Image (cartoon, rainbow, N blue to C red):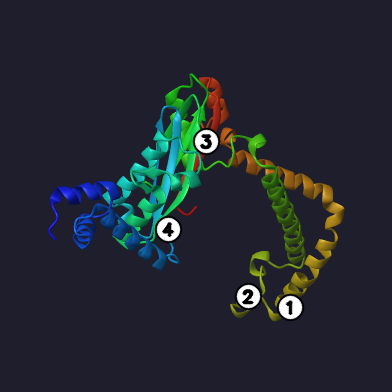
Amino acid sequence: MAVSLADIKKLRDITGAGMMDVKKALEEANGDFEVAKDLLRKRGQAIAAKRSDREASEGCVLAKVKDNFGAIVGVKCETDFVAKNEDFVGMVKLILDAALDNKVRTKEELKNLKIGNFTVAEIITERSGVTGEKMELADYACLEAPVVDAYNHLGNKLSSLVAAEAGADHETVHGISMQVAAMSPIALDADHVAEDVKKHELEVAIEKTKQDEINKAVENALRKAGLNPAHCDSDDHIASNTTKGWLTEEQAQVARDIRAKVPVEAEANLAAQAKKIEMIAQGRLNKFLKESTLVEQAYIMSESKELVKDVLKAKGVQILDFRRITLSAE
């Protein structure tokens, strides 16, 4: 049966599906809206199931604030073409507005939130049916505070939220939102870094320091033997540099003997250097915390590279928390 443009527009507004898909569904359903919606939903589910093993690495991330409540929504798709599509971006905006209106707290709550007659999960599935691409609600974050600022980076792949105490200068808070987006801090300050993260980073630093000590012993032994460590840093390089004439066969064998013997001896001596290794590793951990925590980072908006904590102190701004979501590989 023929369907009117008004009916097509009405169902499109309800479902977010494409005009031709809505028209076809209404025709098959003989104008019955409920049957047509069910057809669109089933098609979306079928396509989503077929493409469930596909990688969805593109998408759209958007952040917004309403009544001191900020949210970030990230929806993934397969291609940049779809990610930039007006209807796809419009769907993300629709979901974001619903999250703000309902002050949604979790990703799972957002999936089950109803917009009209459909849940957010169903809306995304239906859009997947329209485009033929796998789509998924990739991430969700929210903050509520006296002052909340949202920043959306150009390209809709990266957004951040920053929460601050009442009376905070909005321009400064927005600058911090940009800082969070650009520098990806893991926590507000060292006290807010999880203990398991600190423990892991210290363990990594200790292992790296031990390996550096072993490498240093090998380099010293090579130099003592009159060899250039850069020419002997692997068996492949030793063989290659011998072919080039940079090492004699005798020198090559000396280098191989050193690389086989010295690391074992150096590793056996590490226990005697435990205190030194611990101090170096702790220094590396401190460096990691300085580079990775918001208040200790150099402020990107400052030409003199002031620390964020000094900028905040000068402006009398107290940052409470932040969130950051990106779909880009980092």
Amino acid marked by disc 2: Asp
Asked which secondary structure carries label 1, the reply is helix
Asked which secondary structure carries label 4, the reply is loop
Give the Cα separation between the discs numbered 3 and 1.
Answer: 57 Å
Q: Which mark is residue 202?
A: none
Mark 4 vs mark 2, foreground winner is 4
Mark 3 vs mark 1, foreground winner is 3
Q: State yes or no: discs 4 and 2 in contact (Cβ < 8 Å).
A: no
Give the Cα separation between the discs numbered 3 and 4.
Answer: 24 Å
The residue closer to the viewer here, 97 or 13, is: 13
Amino acid marked by disc 4: Ser
Q: Which mark is residue 253?
A: 1
Asked which secondary structure carries label 3, the reply is strand
Mark 1 vs mark 4, foreground winner is 4
Q: Which mark is residue 236?
A: 2
Mark 3 vs mark 2, foreground winner is 3
| Crowd tier of the residue under label 2, counting other residues whose Cα lies within 10 Å: few below 14, some 14–19, many 20 or above | few
| Crowd tier of the residue under label 1, counting other residues whose Cα lies within 10 Å: few below 14, some 14–19, many 20 or above | some
Asked which secondary structure carries label 2, the reply is helix
Amino acid marked by disc 3: Phe
Mark 3 or mark 4: whose residue is earlier in sequence:
4
From the image, tell me which residue sits under label 4: 57
Q: Which mark is residue 322?
A: 3
Quadrant of the rendered image containing residue 251? bottom right
- Image x and y of residue 278, in percent: 78, 47
Q: State yes or no: discs 1 and 4 in contact (Cβ < 8 Å).
A: no
Quadrant of the rendered image containing residue 19? bottom left
Mark 1 or mark 4: whose residue is earlier in sequence:
4
Give the Cα separation between the discs numbered 1 and 2.
Answer: 13 Å
Give the Cα separation between the discs numbered 1 and 4.
Answer: 49 Å
